[in-house]
Image (cartoon, rainbow, N blue to C red):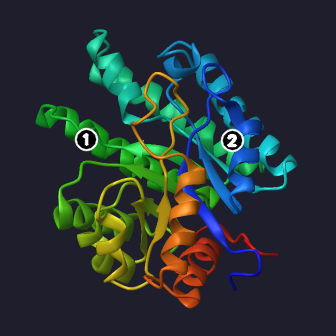
Amino acid sequence: MLDKELPLCDNHAHTNPVIGIGPRELARRFRREGGRFIVIVALLTWSLGLTPGDLDSVRKMYDITVESARIINEEGVKSVAIVGLHPAEGYELLNRGWSREDVRRFMEKGIDLAAEYVKEGKAVGIGEVGRPHWEVPNDVIDLFNELLEYTFGVAKDVNAVVHLHLERNGVNTALSIIDMVRRVGNRPYSVIMHHAEPITINITSSNGVMPSIPMGRKGEFEEAVKHGPRFVVESDFIDDPKRPGAVIPPWTLVRKLRNYLVNGFINEEFLQAICVDNIYKVYGVDVMG
């Protein structure tokens, strides 16, 4: 396999054509290192110089995400778009004095708009959505849980993938999502736990939720491998030159994967499972086809 093209994939990354290298350069660097498939997820409105709380800005952000995935495909790397409102969007509006009800209504409009993009074939999923990973009052957590359940229902209706942004509270976090997905009835493996902890792999994968392991967190991929190839991997690249060390870039992720294979830490079957079989389970995309 080492003499052939490898199935090297990144399940969750962002690209910023306003302040970063943008999608074309990202694709070229990723492809040079052997990258085959990358999922491009919407950023925050203000990361792109847009306005929080403005639905037209949300639409522009979604359009930028969709166009980024299109450009990456044009450069010879398979890519799909995920559009939605990060919990930080809602939290920012609360900080600006919006009522919980007004925030709920706005976030629901953003989710409904994301579903329209999925229905139109522009995007394959909604995300990243979820709960703040920082300390917030319980009533704020309740609001975001309600929005999460709303998102799962909308996603089920349009057969969308969902990328989740969550606190890292181990099995408790995983169980809360499994319970919600069961109640709503989303398609197995259509819900992805972005920045999943290795300890959650067994319980999530056994219950139809796909854990996405961040390659940039020291020791976590090594720990994840002990649970078998029941996950996907991500860089969570943010394409922000002001924060160069925040996360690893996609081309570093695929370099790391290749090194793990060369060094014998994983074998060809393991790589095939996490980067081809599991990607197909989630997105229906044939990475090597």
Secondary structure under tag 1 reads loop
> Is 169 left or right of 225, judged from the image as shown?
left
Up-down: is 179 above or below 105?
Answer: below
In the rendered image, which residue does mark 1 sit on? 133
Which of the two residues, 244 or 269, is positioned nearer the viewer here?
244
Left or right: residue 188 compared with residue 9: left
State whether residue 197 is above or below residue 265: above
Question: Does residue 6 appear to the left or right of 131 in the view shown?
Answer: right
Say which label, 2 or 1, has the lower sequence index: 2
Q: Which residue is drawn at 16% across and 32% down?
A: 136
Residue where numbered disc 2 is placed? 26
Number of residues whose C-alpha sits closer than 10 Å to that of mark 2, classed few (under 14), some (14–19) or many (20 or more):
many
Q: In the rendered view, tell whether residue 47 sits above or below residue 145.
A: above
The amino acid type found where label 1 is placed reads His
Q: Quadrant of the C terminus?
A: bottom right
Q: What residue type is labelled 2?
A: Leu
Indicate the position of residue 64 as horizontal and vertical percent values. Answer: 70, 30
The location of residue 48, given as percent across then percent down, is 58, 20
Q: Which residue lies furthest to the right in this view?
A: 74
Instruction: Judge depth for marks 2 and 1 and give the one in front.
Output: 2
Dot 1 alpha-carbon crowd within 10 angstroms: few under 14, some 14 to 19, many 20 or more: few
Look at the image and tell me in which quarter the N terminus lies: bottom right
Residue 157 screen position, x and y as percent:
59, 58
Query: Which element type, helix, strand or loop, lies under badge 2?
Result: helix
